Image (tube, grey):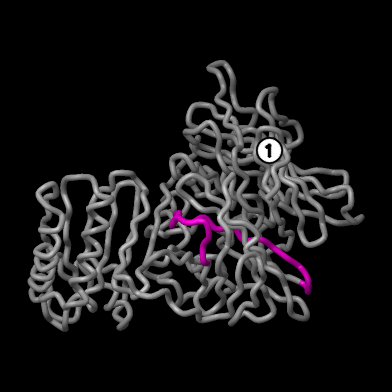
Amino acid sequence: MRRTAAGLAATVLVLLTACTGGSPDPDPTASTGPTQQATADAGPEAVVAEATYLSLPVEVEVAPVRVKDDVALLQVEYRLGADAPAGSTFSAGQVLKTTTGPVGPNGVRLVDLGTGEVFLPGTDAAGQPAVTRDYVQATPGTPATSEGLYQAPAGETVAVLFPYLGLVREVPVVRLDAGEDLPVTAQDLGREGELTYAGAPMDAFTVAFDDSSSTRVTQEEVTVSLASDVLFGVDQADLTPQAQAVVDSAATEIAAKAAEGSVQVIGHTDDVASPEYNQDLSVRRAQAVVDRLAPVLGAAYAVTAEGRGESEPAVPGTTPEARAANRRVEIRFTAVTPGTSVEIGTGAALPEPTGPVASGSSAVEVAGVTGFAVRATQVERVGPFLVGSLEVERTGTGTGQPTGLFGDFVQGRATARGLSAFSMGGGAHNATLLGTASRYYPLDYVRPPSAVPGPDVRAVVADEWIVAPMAPGDTVTATVLWPDPGGDTVTLDVPERFRLTDVPVTSP
């Protein structure tokens, strides 16, 4: 990435202009007036991002995000570079939409790297996003602008995560005075009535190399899930020797990361036996973990045991895989530092690669999705996070889509994580980093109810739908945010697809 604006960040991006089939027409009530007239006020400068889509030069200019009360206005201008071929078009309204959403840049998210939050566009009572409802087409000499209303971030700057385009950081946040109003209203964007604005904290998810445990870190607490099939024999509540090592590893990490106070140990079972039997078994298994854990932690921690039987399955279903995931003992505690990385493992060896391998910035051919290569153009440390830019190139003959390039529905514990079907089918959900003892998955969050009707569904803080039709030699870029496992280099692993070793980690 090359910074080009004085005192501000400008991220080199790759833009995708392919259209998604079956997209609805633009909202006929959307106003184009604000798009044509809105300009950044004097003061902080816009962040300009130089970009290339295939051979098409594009500039993206993100204006300072203006805030009134709790509402933020995002304005982005798209321009084609001087060398753009005559007749070329960049349709931001097609490129930046969500998979099932209307035409318009409703897939653009604000990311507050200081507070660890993600913000989606505000929505009306019908769940329709408050963004420009238009194709937003930039052509040579004619720029196009999109606007959107979001919940206001807390910091002085904010990052903007675009589908396919990347993460543009350090966009200034300007808070308007009492007598000032935002130049764009919900009505200008075709939305009526009261809008709902929501944000969500980013969570971390890791899995031990030997699958003995998984860990979810939220802003409120840390939950370590120990696999009962590793801890105990069938219908037993005595820790196996391997289980003792797993619990000891958890105790060491808890002692280092937990705030003094309550540590809850909760047993869970599958639904095979009777509810009464399962409840009793879950209590006995939780107590066995407490008996091993409490002496290591000491008097500063109040360690309690509780059983919940089959009442709280981790995943739905009665398949052997679902039932195995539901047989677990959870350890819950509050971290000293909210959102801190927690890694539980027993010293298992680094897993062997299950796909082709390359190192550093070299490209690697992808297994399972033929005719594509991937290389890490940059992995940058930003606060407690790593931001990765992964270039995907079409190396095969003919036009092809990189669907499933970063894993599919049955990989990466996608179902257990509660990810959407689209993320699992076309997103970078399984682009993991290999730590000391665990696999670090991309950051994720529970999508606000206003954005997703029905049960909670998680989304990854990464590209979620990478399906661009690509001709030979074409490239697109996928962006992924991870918790930081530490170190000067990282190993990026997508099981059954590829591995990149010794990728340098840079700092801003």
* Circle 1 SS class: strand
Residue 22: image location, x then y, percent? 66, 66
Horizontal arrangement in the rendering, residue 219 relative to residue 375 (left or right): left
Asked if residue 155 lies in the magenta stretch, the reply is no
Quadrant of the image occupied by residue 270: bottom left
Residue 163: image location, x then y, percent? 62, 56
Horizontal arrangement in the rendering, residue 136 relative to residue 235 (left or right): right
Asked if residue 478 lies in the magenta stretch, the reply is yes
Task: For residue 302, say whether it is visible.
Answer: yes
Task: Determine the residue positioned at 8% across, 76% down.
Answer: 277
Residue span colored magenta: 471-491
Quadrant of the image occupied by residue 130: top right
Task: Determine the residue positioned at 70% across, 29% down.
Answer: 40
Residue pointed to by mark 1: 47
What type is the residue that disc 1 sits on?
A: Val
Q: In this view, does 345 lie above or below 223?
A: below
Task: For residue 106, say whether it is visible.
Answer: no
Q: Is residue 328 above or below residue 453?
A: below
Q: Report the residue that reaches farthest toward the right.
A: 86
Residue 296: image location, x then y, percent? 14, 58
The image quadrant where one finds the C terminus is top right
